[in-house]
Image (cartoon, grey):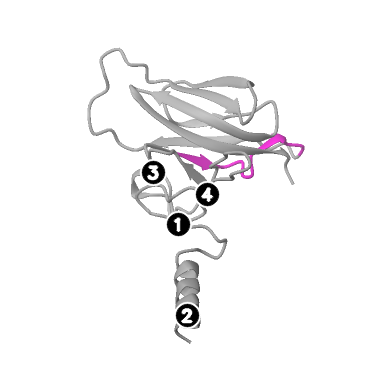
Amino acid sequence: MVTWGRFLLGSVLLLAGCTASGQPATNADGPATASVNTATGCAARVETGSLPDWADEGFHGDTRAPHVFGARGEIVAVLFGNPLAQVRSDGSNNKILWVARPATTSPAPGASTTLEITATLDGTDTTVTHEVAGGPGPSIIDMPEAGCWHLDLRWAGRTDTMDLVYADRKP
């Protein structure tokens, strides 16, 4: 009986740490532990809860929007074109609002404010670059192929990374 009780307790504790989608609960001030697809190494995780306080400026009312945190928690991609797709036959865009966590130090003199994105398709040598003039802000980020894209993000002397998944076509 003791073994069965431990099994039930362990199961309950395991389930309590997950949301309805089976993902860990979101931390309102930063990223939750990402779910990694071990087959591809893709750590893309679209959160659907509230944006953190530092990223909700300009939003009114409920600040729930699909978003992905950078691995270091320095930036969040708010996905207005969710799900992202390589082909969007409905005329919509892969619109992403990039919001950087407020800096704790001044940027290095001469550091570019442009958000520079270097994206690599998982498992390939395919690399694409994008720039968001003026730094993190609104953008349309399209990718030439569907799949998991690893993004290296650089702006104002700061860096972060994230994975974004682009579907073959918008459902």
Query: Looking at the image, is mark 2 or mark 3 nearer the viewer?
Result: 2
- Disc 2 and disc 3: Cα gap in Å? 46 Å
Task: Point out which mark residue 62 bears.
Answer: 1
Depth check: 61 or 70 in front?
Answer: 70
Q: Earlier in the sequence, mark 2 or mark 3?
A: 2
Query: Which residue lies under the disc numbered 2?
Result: 3
- Is the residue marked by circle 3 packed among few (<14), some (14-19), or many (20+) residues within 10 Å? many
Location of residue 11 with respect to 160 vertically, above or below: below
Query: Which residue lies under the disc numbered 4?
Result: 35
The residue at 30%/12% (across/down) is: 110
Query: Looking at the image, is mark 3 or mark 1 nearer the viewer?
Result: 3
Query: Looking at the image, is mark 4 or mark 1 nearer the viewer?
Result: 4
Q: Are marks 3 and 1 in contact (CB under 8 Å)?
A: no
Percent of width and height locating residue 116: 47, 21
Q: Secondary structure at mark 2?
A: helix
Task: Point out which mark residue 12 bears.
Answer: none
Location of residue 134 with respect to 52 vertically, above or below: above
Q: Amino acid at mark 4?
A: Ser
Q: Secondary structure at mark 4?
A: loop
Q: Earlier in the sequence, mark 4 or mark 1?
A: 4
Location of residue 89 with respect to 22 vertically, above or below: above
- Disc 2 and disc 1: Cα gap in Å? 45 Å
